[in-house]
Image (cartoon, helix red, strand yellow):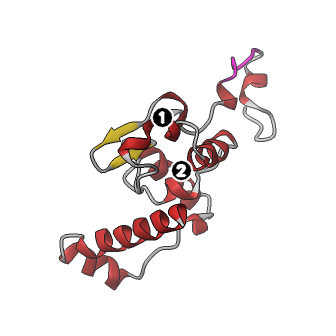
Amino acid sequence: MTDEKTPQHEESGGDDLGHGRLPLCREPWESYYILRRGILPCCHGNPIIAPITGWADAWNCPQIREIRRHLSQGRLSPYCLESLGCPIVQRVLREQKEKGKSDALPRRPAFLRFLNRLMFRIPGRAVRAVRELRARRKRSG
């Protein structure tokens, strides 16, 4: 029988080999994606974190360090929460919803979600583009 207070590696009588301390996602430590539009910390990332010409500086830029810090603490970063296509983000949000902690990401009203789908997701893309522009202006100035 499993006791909720007892860690799993103690139940089995062995060590978990550090797997309990792994971050939610290892992508920001292992690679990044260089595309024409810019550099992303993962294949599901949005917005870009650096222009393509800044690939050398992007590896340890402040945005990447913030993402790594959140993930190493077992939490999703604000950047990750914007990447709803990511299976890890979907899993974590689903688990939080099942536990009753679904306040991690505010849900839009049903009519806005329907309207977005009806219009081929163009409104959602426009909102993300505006956010990306604001983030670029904030970084540059």
Q: Amino acid at mark 2?
A: Val
Q: Which mark is residue 46?
A: none
Is residue 111 magenta-colored? Answer: no
Instruction: Give how far across and how far down residue 123 sits, in percent.
Output: 28, 76
Picture quarter with the C terminus: bottom right
- Start-end of magenta stretch: 14-18
Instruction: Classify 47 as above or below 103.
Output: above
Q: Nearer the viewer, residue 63 or 44?
A: 63
- At x 39%, y 44%, the residue is 39
Instruction: Give how far across and how far down residue 80 sits, in percent.
Output: 50, 53
Picture quarter with the N terminus: top right
- In terms of sequence position, does the residue under pointer 1 or pointer 2 come before the other? 1
Q: Nearer the viewer, residue 136 or 67?
A: 136
Instruction: Classify 101 as above or below 56.
Output: below
Is residue 16 magenta-colored? Answer: yes
Under circle 1, the secondary element is: helix
Instruction: Classify 15 as above or below 46.
Output: above
- At x 43%, y 38%, the residue is 55
Residue hosting label 1: 56
Q: Amino acid at mark 1?
A: Ala
Report the number of discs. 2
Instruction: Give how far across and how far down residue 64 sits, in percent.
Output: 56, 44
Under circle 2, the secondary element is: helix
- At x 45%, y 31%, the residue is 31
Instruction: Give how far across and how far down residue 52 sits, in percent.
Output: 36, 43
As measured in the structure, the alpha-carbon distance from the residue carrying label 1 to the one carrying label 2 is 31 Å
Residue hosting label 2: 92
